[in-house]
Image (spheres, rainbow, N blue to C red):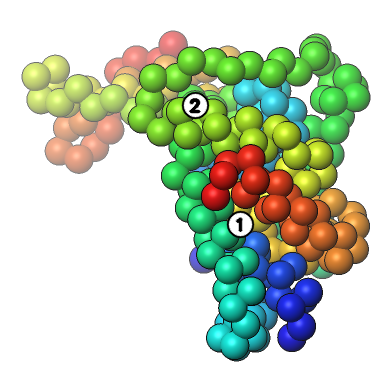
Amino acid sequence: MTCDEARTHIPFYAAQTLSEDEGNALVAHMAGCPPCQAELVEALKLAHVLRRARAPRLPPGAWLPVAARTVGLPVLALNVGPALGGVQIEVQASPGRPRITGNLAVLGQKIPIMGI
Amino acid sequence: MDDRKLVAEVADGDARAFRELYNRYADRVFRYALSLLRDRHLAEEVVQETMVALWKGAGRFEGRSLVSTWIFGIARHQAFRLLRGEAKGAREPEVRDEPDPAPGAELAVRVRRALDKLPPEQREVVVLAFYGGLSYAEIAQVQGVPEGTVKSRMFHAKKKLAEVLRL
């Protein structure tokens, strides 16, 4: 591996997206090449900063409209516990309008008690 | 379970497999879309459209590419549709520096500003590699350019970022 090849691979090594074989070849080259080692240090610092910077994340509710347009899974399940007789309330997202159902849990069985 | 098996199960209508793929990719697609559009709401829209396209198109996925490049390719297409104003209710992207009190926010703003100084195609490579976890070969497929172009873009982006962030 030449220094030019190594330097184009180094950022991907720092990003941990280089294949194992390419990573091994790169490490073998760098073992005897101080300039490329310096490049690696710079790339690793960059990777560290990019990781430390709080990467933007989707808001928690982002799954809801996706579920509503696709699988229609229950998206919210509230188990209110024995104080209210073990009532479990589920909100169902579906391609139509949201559906809210309530079940009473008795001896492991779900008994429907409401549906809106 | 690997991504290909999950896509096969999604093609059979398996909702759990779909949720698993969503969990694996939604945030990564969001970061990628955000880097292209620089608008959180539009980026969320890209995630939604990409995931719906995945659900509907899983049966047509032939496995000729990796699942990751397929998904990021869909996201790229959706983002460019929005940039061209083709989507329903399309609006101009907003570039905002919203105050954010969360820990790490200051560094996040510094990094975002540094990324914003890069040409778009270089920024895209950095985000796909460091936040999307894609190899240069996968990025080449997503961007539709030779692998050498991706390597060159990353090389120049790294130089610029090291300079701007004073590494």
Disc 1 is placed on an element classified as loop
User: In this rendering, would B43 be left or right of A79?
Assistant: right
Report the chain holding disc 2. Answer: A
Q: Nearer the viewer, residue B107 or B148?
A: B107
Q: Nearer the viewer, residue A16 or A44?
A: A44
Please say whether residue A115 is visible from this viewpoint.
yes
Can you give x and y, in whole percent of width and height, for residue B101 in the image? 39, 19
What residue sits right under mark 1 in the picture? B133
User: In this rendering, would B34 be left or right of A46?
Assistant: right
Disc 2 is placed on an element classified as loop
A38 over A70 or under it: above or below:
below
What residue sits right under mark 2 in the picture? A59
Please say whether residue B11 is visible from this viewpoint.
no
Can you give x and y, in whole percent of width and height, for residue A115 in the image? 40, 15
Q: Nearer the viewer, residue A23 or A39?
A: A39
Residue B133, quarter of the rendered image: bottom right
Identify residue type, mark 2.
Pro
